[in-house]
Image (tube, rainbow, N blue to C red):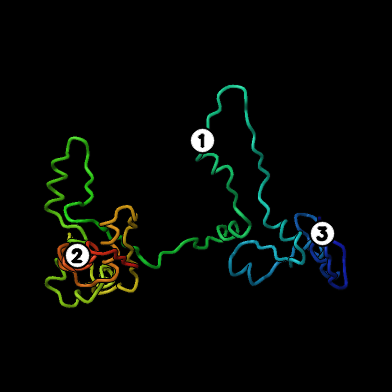
Amino acid sequence: MFPKEFRTETTRNVRDYPLYRRRPGDTAFVRVREMDNRFVVLHNPYLLLKHNVYINVKVCTSLRVVKYIYKGFDCANMVSTAGQVQYNGIANYIDARFVSAPEAMWRLIESHMHDLSQAVMRLPVHLSNQKRVTFKEGHEEDALEAARSRQRMLESWFQLNQSDPDAQTLLYSDIPCNYVYDRNNWKRRKTGGNKIVARMYVVNLKEAERFYLSMLLLHVPGATSFKFFERLTTPFMTLSSKQPFTITY
């Protein structure tokens, strides 16, 4: 509460904020009222000038002070037993969320909350003739025809490896950093490769064939077709038919 008392030195207060030094001095009239140093709110001139917003500066000297700064608004859960209760999950989330003091300050001074440094490119993983097809009701044939004529990223990678020796040295997950996927084809990238993060879709272990295909894509470069992996795994399949054999990744 203001006005504060004049003090010759700052003293520590374990139960609250410190009692800061306030020396008597000049006075000024603010809205027809005489003010002195007892009415001055603690501040930092540099921060006021830099951010062009009011910032109250105090020293936190106890856990009670920290709790006071970060506490949210009071919120109570109530249950109505008279009549039907309608549950709205979105409204409950918004009503229960509060903006903490640091976040509120960050928004008031219009600082950026988020920034995009890297673009994430997701790479599909599918077996031969098992591409995912989306369609609208009544247009199933059109969607199937488009899927037959259009190559996905994985199939375009096979085609790229057939003609580009440089691509043959790269894993499937490394291709987006060196090539651009444009009009269903991979084309050599000129710039921006250091700002790309490639991520393959997660495959459940229960989908055994697709899961192990994803494992091979993470370790085998230069594949030119799905049959390339079939030839690669044939010796292991033959061996496993004769005796127990386990591949560990």
- Indicate which disc, 2 or 1, sits on the residue closer to the N terminus: 1
Decide: is 248 above or below 104.
Answer: below
- Identified at 21% across, 56% down, the residue is 127
Q: How many residues crowd around disc 2 within 10 Å: few (fewer than 14), some, or many (20 or more)?
A: few
Q: What is the quadrant of the N terminus in the image?
A: bottom right
Q: CA distance from mark 2 to mark 1?
A: 57 Å
Q: Which residue is mark 1?
A: 88
Q: Toward the viewer: 85 or 118?
A: 85
Going from N to C along the chain, the mark reached first, 3 or 2, is 3
Q: CA distance from mark 1 to mark 3?
A: 53 Å
Residue 238: numbered disc: 2
Q: Amino acid at mark 2?
A: Thr
Spot occupied by residue 95 in the image (x, y as percentages of width and height): 57, 42
Splitting the image into 4 quarters, where does residue 182 fall? bottom left
- Binning the other alpha carbons within 10 Å of mark 1 as few (below 14), some (14 to 19) or many (20 upward) gives few
Give the x, y percent position of residue 213.
26, 62
User: Vertical placement of 5 versus 170: above or below?
Assistant: above
- Determine the residue positioned at 28% across, 61% down: 212
| Residue pointed to by mark 3 | 34
The reply to whether dot 3 and dot 2 touch (C-beta < 8 Å) is: no
Secondary element under disc 1, as helix, strand or loop, is loop
Q: CB under 8 Å between callouts 2 and 1? A: no
Mark 1 vs mark 3: give the one in front.
1
Q: Which mark is residue 111?
A: none
Is residue 83 left or right of 126 when viewed as pictured?
right
Q: Residue at x 63, y 57 (%)?
A: 101
Can see residue 227?
A: yes
User: Eyeballing the image, is 57 above or below 170?
Assistant: above
Whole-number angstrom distance, CA of label 3 to CA of label 2: 96 Å
